[in-house]
Amino acid sequence: IPAGIDDGQQVVLRGYGGQGTNGGPNGDLYLVVSVKSHKHYKRHGNDIYLDVPVSYVDILDERTIEIPTPEGKEMIKLDSKTQSGSIFTFRGKGFPSTRGPFKGNFIAHIVIYVPKAHGKDKDKIIELAEKSKDKTREKWMKEF
């Protein structure tokens, strides 16, 4: 089975089919490939997509995080510009093409989550956040 083959594509094995009539050559065997989906990786063409959960703490601290790709770990440096929905592309880290010498891309899609906080920790976080005086939502509301 060639690398990069997609769900529903066929592989033809010449001469491995049924026996020919009247002593003729064997026919061809056609295999229809069924590719099992992955729990986290999603395929679109030759590109691989992955939703990457990132805590807002990782962004505030501008951490470097590991991203698991099918070819091994890659690193992403987060910064204050990183938003939920940000995209990081790793060129040539996707599926190989069955029609040429190129590979698709690996695309990491950032999904920001808020970690759970309880009691005094939660109160401290709220207090610090209120001191930042972020006006993003207020500016957005004025547009309506």
Image (spheres, grey):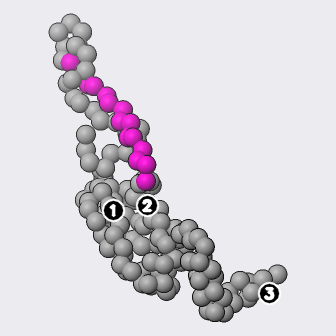
The reply to whether residue 129 is visible in this rendering is: no
Q: Earlier in the sequence, mark 3 or mark 1?
A: 1
Crowd rating for badge 1 (residues with CA inside 10 Å; few <14, some 14–19, many 20+):
some
Q: How many marks?
A: 3
Q: At which x and y percent is residue 50?
A: 43, 60
Give the spatial CA distance, label 1 vs label 2.
9 Å
Residue 33 forms part of the magenta stretch: yes
What residue is pinned by disc 2?
A: 50
Give the spatial CA distance, label 2 vs label 3.
35 Å
Residue 142: assigned label: 3
Looking at the rendered image, the quarter that the N terminus falls into is top left
Give the magenta range: 26-40
Q: Earlier in the sequence, mark 1 or mark 2?
A: 2
What residue is pinned by disc 1?
A: 68
Which SS class for mark 2? Answer: strand
Tag 2 and tag 3, C-beta contact below 8 Å: no
Please name the amino acid that badge 1 sits on.
Answer: Pro
Q: Earlier in the sequence, mark 2 or mark 3?
A: 2
Please name the amino acid that badge 3 sits on.
Answer: Lys
Residue 104 placement, left or right of 141? left
Please name the amino acid that badge 2 sits on.
Answer: Leu
State which quadrant residue 37 falls in: top left
Tag 1 and tag 2, C-beta contact below 8 Å: yes
Q: At which x and y percent is residue 95?
A: 32, 55
Kindly identify the residue that appears in the image at 20 percent across and 24 percent down: 15
> Magenta-highlighted stretch: main secondary structure?
loop
Kindly identify the residue that appears in the image at 31 percent across and 50 percent down: 4
The reply to whether residue 97 is visible in this rendering is: yes
In the image, 46 versus 51, the foreground residue is 51
Which SS class for mark 3? Answer: helix
From this view, report whether residue 76 is shown above or below residue 105. below
Kindly identify the residue that appears in the image at 63 percent across and 86 percent down: 127
